[in-house]
Every structure is written in structure tokens, then in C-alpha cells.
């Protein structure tokens, strides 16, 4: 990861080597957030760089396979940013990462390879007209109760029932 951020991306994009440190800082900010909702002005202030560079940084890191940007249905606006692999969360976080972030990262990582995943206006994700809310064993259906084709994806359960699907099932899609 260090090689990619410090050498490969700056060399490929024609940036100076100092940008590599900023990219590493950006990765740490994403890892600590639950999940990360980008505010380009705030990020630019933290990284001490121009706001105009931030979108490019995100695109280069995404092209390198380290993050994934979750967009709205029209693919115009980035709503959330996830690390591409939940193992990176454990590597980059100062403490144990938030379990909700790990669940959503895993779910997004598994489904993005076969489906166009976008943000849902009422829940976590929307895929092919289905609305999916990701949570733990105690997650209820409150957020999706009025949604046609709404599903709850739960961690720490063995079997699905009604419109509840175990999170581990999605590991078979990859």
C-alpha cells in the first residue's frame, strides 16, 4: 500500500513525491470514519492542499484499488467512500475499527464486482431496485418498513428469514 501511495500514484499521475504523504493521510481519514462522507473543503484543510486536488486524489486511489466511491443513482455525486477491503480497516485504524463500517465495507466489496451498487435515499445501499440495510444481529426493519423490495442484511445470524439475509451469504458472490 505504501508503495502504491508514495511512489506509483504520484509517478503515474505526474505529481510530486510529497503528494504521497497526503494520500496516506487521506487513507487514514477514510479508515477512521464510519463510513466516510466526503467534504472536500474539510479534507483539503486537513491535508493542507487545494480543494480542487481532492477529487483527483480520490480517483487515483480508487483506480489503484484501495478505495471505492459509493455514488447516487445518477452517478454524479459521491455520497460515501469505503476502503476497498475491510482488512485495510484493521491495518489503517488506530484502534479496532467500527464494526458497522466493517460490515458495510464487506458488503459493498462483495457486491460491487457483479452489480452496480449505489446509495439508497432511505438505507445503506440500492442494487437493481432493491434497498438493503446492513447491520448487526439486533438490526430491525424500521428503516425499510415502507420500502418495496427492502431487505435487512444481518451479521451474526446463521439463517435468513422473511426479508432478512445473513451477511455471510454475500461472501459467495465474489
Image: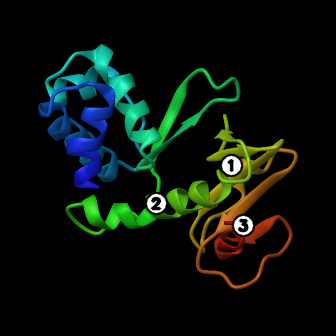
Q: Secondary structure at mark 3?
A: helix
Question: Which of the two discs, 1 and 3, labels the residue nearer the N terminus?
Answer: 1
The picture places residue 159, in percent across and down from the top left corner, at 76, 83
- Residue drawn at point x = 70 percent, y = 29 percent: 73
Marks counted in the figure total 3
Q: Is 124 rendered above or below residue 173? A: above
- Residue drawn at point x = 45 percent, y = 48 percent: 65
Q: Is 19 rendered above or below residue 132? A: above
- Residue drawn at point x = 59 percent, y = 54 percent: 108
Which residue in the protein does label 1 denote? 143
- Residue drawn at point x = 24 percent, y = 38 percent: 23
Alpha-carbon neighbours of circle 3 within 10 Å: few (<14), some, or many (≥20)?
Answer: few
Decide if residue 69 is on the left or right side of residue 166: left
The picture places residue 74, in percent across and down from the top left corner, at 69, 23
Question: Which of the two discs, 2 and 1, labels the residue nearer the N terminus?
Answer: 2
**6, 102: nearer the viewer:** 6
Amino acid at each position: 500500500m505504501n508503495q502504491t501511495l508514495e511512489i506509483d500514484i504520484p509517478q503515474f499521475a505526474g505529481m510530486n513525491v510529497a503528494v504521497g504523504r497526503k494520500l496516506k493521510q487521506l487513507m487514514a481519514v477514510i479508515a477512521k470514519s464510519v463510513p466516510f462522507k466526503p467534504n472536500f473543503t474539510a479534507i483539503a484543510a486537513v491535508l493542507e492542499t487545494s480543494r480542487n486536488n481532492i477529487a483527483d486524489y480520490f480517483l487515483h486511489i480508487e483506480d489503484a484499488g484501495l478505495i471505492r466511491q459509493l455514488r447516487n443513482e445518477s452517478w454524479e455525486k459521491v455520497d460515501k467512500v469505503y476502503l476497498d477491503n475491510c482488512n485495510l480497516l484493521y491495518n489503517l485504524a488506530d484502534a479496532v475499527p467500527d464494526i458497522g463500517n466493517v460490515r458495510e465495507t464487506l458488503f459493498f466489496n462483495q457486491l460491487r464486482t457483479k452489480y452496480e451498487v449505489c446509495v439508497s435515499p432511505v438505507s445503506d445501499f440500492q442494487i437493481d431496485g432493491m434497498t438493503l440495510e446492513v447491520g448487526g444481529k439486533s438490526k430491525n426493519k424500521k428503516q425499510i418498513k415502507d420500502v418495496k423490495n427492502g431487505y435487512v442484511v444481518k451479521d451474526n445470524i446463521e439463517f435468513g428469514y422473511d426479508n432478512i439475509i445473513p451477511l455471510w451469504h454475500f461472501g459467495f458472490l465474489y
